[in-house]
Image (spheres, rainbow, N blue to C red):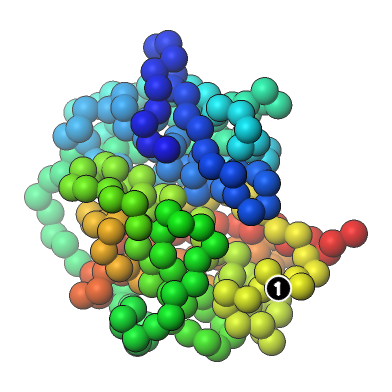
């Protein structure tokens, strides 16, 4: 999925698998767009943030064209813009920023929730690319351990893409938990009377991640308005190190 094919200057083409709902998974498009941007950036620059808008539902039967715009090449920071297109038009618009690692204070305020370790939990997964284990059976925040099953390797950039891929999985659970507190995280799609979609997505990459190792994601919905729920999440490794922060707006509408 990450082996994007060059298709002209700063343009790449990728494909995706068929998902249970028939369209494309938003995390896939974000991960591939980030990969396309990284292919135009010197490896000494590390991605530190991305901001994406999901514009249209993708079609798994079509290839996806990623057009990269080199917005700025600086000495410390590099900025890229990526548009993902299919025959229907643009399906995603993303901006990403990259920085050279520099010596500076390293401080952490965020702390992970107290939950059982992944070995003590049962796994649930709707696909075979990554594994998920919900760490809380109560309604409220969506908390789960996740890890990639496909081998990612040591490439720091590719591990960032893997995190981007998994980052679109839990935000909806937190929004549903606020709207329907009687449902626990992970079972909202069973006879669920709403239609949902990811609207926009942001990731701040704080520290390197090894995507094949278990990491903990905790999402909380901070409010719902005009059918949009705002979900904010933190990502920690097994030692409690804060790896990333994720935010997403989720659209929830009554089925009609």
Q: Is residue 2 left or right of residue 155?
A: right
Given residues 76 and 119, the one toward you in this image is 119
User: What residue lies at 21% left-to-right and 43% top-to-bottom?
Assistant: 155
Residue 191: x and y, percent? 76, 73
Given residues 30 and 221, the one toward you in this image is 30
Q: Is residue 60 left or right of residue 168?
A: right
Q: Secondary structure at mark 1?
A: loop
Residue 104: x and y, percent? 12, 54
Decide if residue 227 is in sight here: no
Residue 228: x and y, percent? 69, 60
User: What residue lies at 65% left-to-right and 44% top-to-bottom?
Assistant: 23
Residue ranking furthest to the top:
8
Location of residue 58 (image quadrant): top right
Decide if residue 140 is in sight here: yes
Location of residue 92 (image quadrant): top right
Q: Disc 1 designates what residue?
A: 190
User: What residue lies at 54% left-to-right and 62% top-to-bottom?
Assistant: 126
Crowdedness near tag 1: few (<14), some (14–19) or many (≥20) residues, C-alpha within 10 Å: few
């Amino acid at each position: 999925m990450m082996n994007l094919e060059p298709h002209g200057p700063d343009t790449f083409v990728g494909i995706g698998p068929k998902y249970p709902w028939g369209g494309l998974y938003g995390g896939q498009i974000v991960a591939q767009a980030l990969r396309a941007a990284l292919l135009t950036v010197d490896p000494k620059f590390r991605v530190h943030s991305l901001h994406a808008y999901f514009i249209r539902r993708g079609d798994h039967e079509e290839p996806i064209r990623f057009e990269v715009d080199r917005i700025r090449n600086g000495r410390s920071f590099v900025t890229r813009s990526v548009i993902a297109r299919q025959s229907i038009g643009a399906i995603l618009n993303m901006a990403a920023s990259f920085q050279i690692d520099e010596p500076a204070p390293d401080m952490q305020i965020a702390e992970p929730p107290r939950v059982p370790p992944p070995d003590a939990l049962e796994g649930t997964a709707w696909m075979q690319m990554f594994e998920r284990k919900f760490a809380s059976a109560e309604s409220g925040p969506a908390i789960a351990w996740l890890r990639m099953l496909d081998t990612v390797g040591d490439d720091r950039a590719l591990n960032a893409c893997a995190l981007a891929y998994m980052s679109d999985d839990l935000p909806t659970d937190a929004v549903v938990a606020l709207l329907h507190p009687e449902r626990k995280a992970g079972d909202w799609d069973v006879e669920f009377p709403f239609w949902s979609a990811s609207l926009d997505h942001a990731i701040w990459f704080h520290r390197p991640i090894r995507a094949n190792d278990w990491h903990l994601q905790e999402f909380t919905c901070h409010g719902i308005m005009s059918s949009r729920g705002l979900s904010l999440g933190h990502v920690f490794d097994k030692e409690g190190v804060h790896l990333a922060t994720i935010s997403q707006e989720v659209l929830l509408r009554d089925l009609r």
